[in-house]
Amino acid sequence: MSLSRRHVLRGAAAATAAVAAPSLLAQSATWPSKPIRIVVPYPPGGSSDIIARSISTLLGDSLKQSVIVENKAGANGNLGTDFVAKSAADGHTFLLCDVGALAITPSVYSKLPFDPVKDLRGVTMLAYSPHLLVVHPSVPANNLQELIALSKTRDLNFAVTATGSAPHLAGVALQRAVNARWQYIPYKGGIQAIQDTVGGQTQVLMNGMLATLPHVQSGKLKMLGVSKKTRMPLIGATPTIAEQGVKDFESGTWQGVLVPRATPDAVVQKLNAALITAIRSPEVRARLAGQGAEVVTMAPAEQDRFYEAERAKWAKVVSEAGIKVE
């Protein structure tokens, strides 16, 4: 390439950057300037969907814009995630998902249409709810040890929200730790997995407490343990999985918000503040606590660090278990 040609290209790039910078500043100053879409990459009724709908009205009131919750389910959350990753980086479309599950995705899928690190950035975490280990009421086991023993005498179907999902890997980690036997039945979301376990088509389930506890409270599912290091007041009589012999076992769903990587810092900070205000409101906090979810918020950089730690943690489980989705 000639020297003059290089100068032309550099000049064009500089001019583009000069135009883009004021544009981004203008977006930041006027944000939000149109309705906001919360994209939930799972079917309605799951933990992420519950939280999105819990905060949408308060978020809209705070930002003086309408807020729409849109379920874009498919491919274990990858369809909706890809949609947001390729959306305009202006803060008007964001992803509300299980951040821990998103951290598993790069290890499980051989090909992805997006790169979670290069294409997305964190805004804040919103809530954490541990997984509940539950069985159909007809299963003759009342604790983890009885379930382990039973798994060696009869076939047990273990429902998972999807192959490579956080509940799936939690089940794999537990199975490997206690030498249990069961076969995994993948679904297209948590609600379907719950419904089939309630119906007795599958016998065992690990799923987020937020979506699963109501079925325990109604007697449709029997709870054997909770995947938290310490007991929870809401279900104080239920022992943790760690208490039942699996030292330090902890898993769960971490709902958080991400936006396209190029979203301006000023917009990310404004969205972070608005989301934290909504999720920490007394009415939302009380509603979530009554269903077993704890409000957990983070700064954007803190959430990115959390994501990296989760990715490293679950990559080891995926590798050891040989889980891959083409």
Image (cartoon, rainbow, N blue to C red):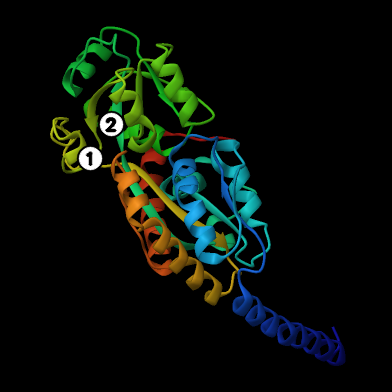
- Tell me the quadrant of the picture where the C terminus can be found: top right
Rate crowding at label 2 as few (under 14), some (14 to 19) or many (20 or more) other CA atoms within 10 Å.
some
Amino acid bearing label 1: Phe
User: Label 2 vs label 1: CA separation?
Assistant: 8 Å
Residue type at mark 2: give it.
Answer: Leu
Of residue 313 and residue 226, the one placed in the foreground of this image is: 226
* Element under disc 2: helix
Tell whether label 1 touches label 2 (CB within 8 Å).
yes
Q: Residue 226 occupies which quadrant of the picture? A: top left
Q: From what the image shows, is residue 88 above or below residue 179?
A: below
Q: Nearer the viewer, residue 2 or 92?
A: 92
* Residue in view at x 35 percent, y 13 percent: 156
Residue under label 2, please give it.
174
Residue denoted by label 1: 249
Q: Nearer the viewer, residue 88 or 145?
A: 88
Report whether residue 183 is seen.
yes
Residue 315, x across and y down, in percent: 41, 46
Relative to 199, residue 284 above or below: below
Could you tell me which residue is drawn at 17 percent across and 30 percent down? 238
In the picture, measured across the screen, residue 143 lies left or right of residue 197, that is: left
Q: 205 or 184: which is nearer to us?
A: 205
Q: Left or right of 79: which side holds 213?
A: left
Is 151 situated above or below 216?
Answer: above
Query: Is residue 179 at least partly visible in the picture?
Result: no
Q: Position of residue 179 (x, y in %)?
A: 25, 24
User: How far from the left and from the top, in percent, is residue 230?
Assistant: 16, 43
